[in-house]
Image (tube, rainbow, N blue to C red):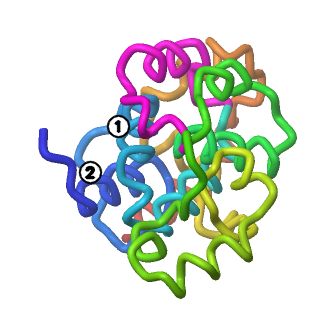
Amino acid sequence: MNITPQLLAARWSRAGALFNAPPAADSPDLEALLLDTARHAHGNSRLYTMAASWLASNDMLILPERLRALIRDELEPRFQPAMGLILDTARGCSGSHRLDAAISACSPAATPEPFFDAERTNPVLRKLAERHASPLSRKWNLWAGEFKLKSDAIKTLASILLDNPIYQDRLSEAGTLALPNAHDLRPARQAARAS
């Protein structure tokens, strides 16, 4: 399948990130979506920001051991630093250690460079990226500025589960008891009916 920026935005939109894109018809495979995101985030800083923001509040929907195995077996080594930075950024915002095994499957880039393509090709932007790189991005040898969490651009868990009921099983696999009750889902259902 040819992964385009529009397709990634549609998949993230369905998963609960507020991209300006119509949501995909089907609930995305979240771990596969993260791999595709790591492969394409260098070309779109918003993709990095939204993925890390979504993970910071919804990492309980990720199957950590499956993600670790996919990183190890399917993610090309050149994209592992991007995956590591995305996951590590989310961990830093949430304080959760659920994704530690997946993070440990990632390796930093062999040589330091800007994370985003636009900064790699322009010498002035390259110097600025290096100067303003956060300590976390330096750990992964992918220079990026300090991360600003966009929690207001991520749907609530209740709304995500309403749009993607298949994710309910992931909560029980994660041992999460914070299943939204009917009261929690009522505003999301009312908004869905109104649109």
Does the rendering let one see residue 142? Answer: yes
Front one among 168 and 87: 87
Query: Which label number is shown at residue 24?
Result: 2
Left or right placement of residue 77 versus residue 145 in this view: left
Marks 1 & 2, CB-CB < 8 Å contact? yes
Front one among 28 and 119: 119
Q: Quadrant of the N terminus?
A: top left
**Among the 4 quarters of the image, the one containing residue 77:** top left
Query: Which label number is shown at residue 169?
Result: none
Q: SS for tag 2?
A: loop
Front one among 53 and 143: 143
Front one among 28 and 81: 81
As drawn, 136 above or below 45:
above
Residue at screen point 66% across, 28% down = 103
> Looking at this rendering, what residue extends furthest in the left direction?
1
- Whole-angstrom CA distance, mark 1 to mark 2, is 8 Å
The residue pinned by badge 1 equals 28
Residue 90 in the image, given as x and y percentages of width and height: 71, 47
Q: Main secondary structure of the magenta part?
A: helix
Q: Residues within 10 Å of mark 2 (few under 14, many from 20)?
A: some
**Among the 4 quarters of the image, the one containing residue 83:** top right
Q: Which residues are magenta?
A: 60-81
Magenta stretch holds residue 145: no
Q: Amino acid at mark 1?
A: Pro
Residue 187 in the image, given as x and y percentages of width and height: 61, 59
Left or right placement of residue 98 versus residue 144 in this view: right
Q: Amino acid at mark 2?
A: Ala
Residue 71 in the image, given as x and y percentages of width and height: 47, 23
